[in-house]
Image (cartoon, rainbow, N blue to C red):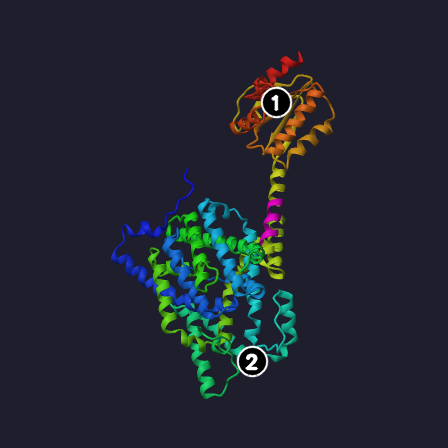
Amino acid sequence: MKLFEFKPKLVSCLKNYSKETFMADLMAGIIVGIVALPLAIAFGIASGVSPEKGIITAIIAGFIISLLGGSKVQIGGPTGAFIVIIYGIIQQYGEAGLIVATLMAGVLLVLLGVFKLGAVIKFIPYPIIVGFTSGIAVTIFTTQIADIFGLSFGDEKVPGDFVGKWLIYFRHFDTINWWNTIVSIVSIIIIAITPKFSKKIPGSLIAIIVVTVAVYLMKTFGGIDCIQTIGDRFTIKSDWEAIRELFPVAITIAVLGAIESLLSATVADGVIGDRHDSNTELIAQGAANIIAPLFGGIPATGAIARTMTNINNGGKTPIAGIIHAVVLLLILLFLMPLAQYIPMACLAGVLVIVSYNMSGWRVFRALLKNPKSDVTVLLITFFLTVIFDLTVAIEVGLVIACVLFMKRVMETTEISVITDEIDPNKESDITVHEENLMIPKGIEVYEINGPYFFGIATKFEETMTQLGDRPKVRIIRMRKVPFIDSTGIHNLTALCEMSQKEKTTIILSGVNKNVHDVLEKAGFYELLGKENICPNINVALERAKSLVE
């Protein structure tokens, strides 16, 4: 099996590329580029960097992800999921720290793809994904409160934590600027009602154009100059220790980027009836996050909303994503000076809608009806994301999910003791009309139903200890044991050695090939004797009878 496979979808798509396909990609690319513009500006500002850096990320990362990616229709760029992480990095390490963390995350993503770990990301439990996605949505909404209400904090710095933010908001709520609030509410209303009139043009773009023109006219002719715009706030234009400290953050960026990009690609597959290459996609995502920060960009990943916009507007191949990047580049070169007039309150309204769509509150509510273990993982991940940060939430959430998974596996593994007879009719789902197999005196039959791993190893030992007797022969049926790990081998070895001291013979019955090979390598032929590892219960009972007679 080859270790390294890199197959960009663009290569296969260009083999049968036609003029009709190009025209479809052209229209989709233009529309997606227009859709991406307000989101890129909003995500950049909310992340704590200047607005053009959000657009630069959408251009460079979007181009590379489409050029090298493993999905036909994936659109890459900055997303709301990274806002909280980026803001935290800049607050603690500055923009230089953000560049280092993004570069490291890019390298990690490339390594995930090179070593074919794309499929592993898909095994992250759904409650964890919903938990931190909903948590991020709440956090994004929280960061926009100041701009929505136009609050003024004087010389006081806004804290980075969730609780601290709300405390300072409440202390300074008397500084509310009602004009800002009106701008935000009008922006939200425009975005919300636009889909009823136009499916092609995004509501966020219409809101930005309408509200920006209205605010400009109010400032110029109405003398209302208390509404802060982008131009009022922005001008439109490392060592080993730092690397060590930023490494956990880089892992978070890489994991989150991998999850979001592969989730987006999977959703797209379901719509277009295609299948993406997850490892190639991860390599492309990594390359984008290595190159984008060199030009001042921020972390990027596959964007579900823009990917779906691409599909819905006829995008067929990665060419549409490349055109979307070119459209954004042209806007950056020729129209960016106009962005300085966009009101901050309007962008806050855009992000309120983004956070609402991200929250997935209906899914969150539905998951609360699931088993308690899933609800526990969901709530812990959600509250850790909101109160602390995403790094802690992912780490703790994964640990809890793993522990709960092992507990479930332990609960599914059953150990039973048979001391009198075995009914062949209960051995399968068909009636075999065979006589019961009698178990002679001095013989005990134990059956393990499920994996024999470290979580269950002591359970078997406890079952035998509770019986307290010392039969001449113990038959251990392992026909329903799919695998055995090193702890299980150690436990079984100790059991056999203890039984030999007590003059009890251990016979293994019905061991499948995988487990059989593991036991052979572990020296069980020498420990028990080849004749005491039997293919089925009939042979095992005959062997046991010969030992007790």
Most extreme residue toward the top is 549
Q: Which residue does the numbered mark 2 point to in the structure image? A: 178
Secondary structure mainly formed by the magenta segment: helix
Residue 173 appearing in the image: yes
Part of the protein shown in magenta: 394-403
- Amino acid type, label 1: Ile
Asked whether the viewer can see residue 77, the reply is: no
Q: How many marks?
A: 2
State the image coordinates of residue 446 (x, y, percent, origin top left). 64, 26
Crowd around label 2: few <14 · some 14–19 · many ≥20 (10 Å):
some
Indicate the amino acid at tag 2: Trp
- Tell me the quarter of the picture where residue 490 sits: top right
> Residue 370 at what x, y percent from top left?
59, 50
- In this image, 168 relative to 267: left or right? right
The residue at the point 72 percent across, 21 percent down is 470
Badge 1: how crowded within 10 Å, few (<14), some, or many (20+)? some
Q: Quadrant of residue 140?
A: bottom right
Up-down relation of residue 67 to residue 203 (above or below)? above
Q: Quadrant of the C terminus?
A: top right
Residue 119, given in percent of the width and then of the height, sits at 47, 45
Question: Which tag is nearer the camera, tag 2 or tag 1?
Answer: 2
Element class at badge 1: strand
Q: Is residue 441 magenta?
A: no
Question: Which x, y percent locates residue 355?
Answer: 52, 64
What residue lies at 59% left-to-right and 64% top-to-bottom? 92
Residue matched to label 1:
422
- Which dot marks residue 93? none
Residue at point 50% right, 78% down?
Answer: 232
